[in-house]
Amino acid sequence: MKLKVLFFSVLLSMFSTQTSFASDYASDYDEDYDVGEDEDVPDSMIFSWNKSAINYSVSGTVDGYEYVDLGLPSGLKWAASNIGAKVPVEYGEYLACGEVGPKDRYDEDNSFISSLNIEELKSKSIINEDGNLTALYDAAAINWSENWRLPTVAEFEELINNCVWSEITLCGVKGYRFESKKIGNNNWIFLPLAGVFYRNSIDYEGSYGRYWSSTLSGFNAYYLYLGSNSAFTERAIRFVGYTVRPVVKE
């Protein structure tokens, strides 16, 4: 049974107030991609994207979504764009930990897993024995395909330690460039500083970014923090809306 079909049946039985899921976004965008003022995007997201003009390349696709091979020791490949984004410089969707679709408000009152402890999460098969989200609660597996998933906190650490990272502005969008340290591998990915979605507003766009991992701890979850010329992993309450960058093993 497909993960999406199974997820709907489980979710409807457990959480009757779940909001609708995000639409699937294919990442096979054109060489030139423009967002103008007539589009429904914030002023800060008006840009023109051209892969060849900025020497940006992808390594391949899995189930229609592009990935970049950074030559990491684990062999893990990183998606070129966030969930909900058509190109790397778009922010994409903001999601709460363990949820797979966007909402209008992010707080403890409309969170489905923030009040559950680790043992409760395991008993409900929300996380596995390693403390990572299972496929039914993984936004990448549900919105893209079962071959994609959220990175673990250890995989974020691998990304930090095996890439040269720096804060840059790309196509008018502030973010972090992670370029492979491996000799002969000049590939890189771009993670925009999308800020956070807390309660009913998005704040700190362009100042910092937070990307959910699949790893939970206590009543928190790990995330990748980007900002102030720093890149590190940290823990936070699970109900805040952060952006998500999937990973895949070919």
Image (cartoon, grey):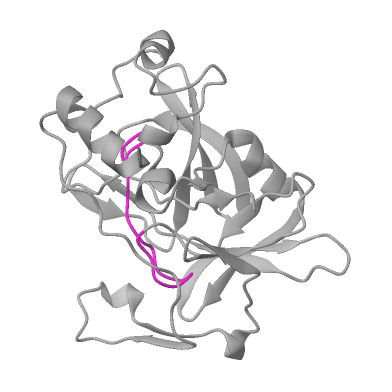
Magenta segment boundaries in residue numbering? 84-99
* Quadrant (top left, top right, bottom left, bottom right) of the N terminus: top left
Predominant secondary structure in magenta?
Answer: loop
Above or below residue 36? Residue 124 is: above
* Percent coordinates x, y for residue 185 in the rendering: 80, 68
Residue 120 quadrant: top left
User: Is residue 91 rendered magenta in the image?
Assistant: yes
Residue 3 falls left or right of residue 147: left
Q: Which residue is nearer to you in this view: 14 or 115?
A: 14
Of residues 9 and 97, which is closer to you in this image? 9
Res 111 seen here: no
Could you tell me which residue is drawn at 64 percent across and 53 percent down? 250
Instruction: State the image quarter where residue 96 is shown.
Output: top left
Which residue is depicted at the point 38% across and 54% down? Answer: 195
Of residues 58 and 190, the one nearer the viewer is 58
Residue 136 percent across, percent down from the top left: 37, 34
**Residue 96 part of the magenta segment:** yes
Q: Is any atom of residue 143 visible in this view?
A: yes
Left or right of 199 in this view: 62 = right
- Find residue 228 and report its horizontal and vertical position in percent: 56, 54
The residue positioned 43% from the left and 79% from the top of the image is: 29
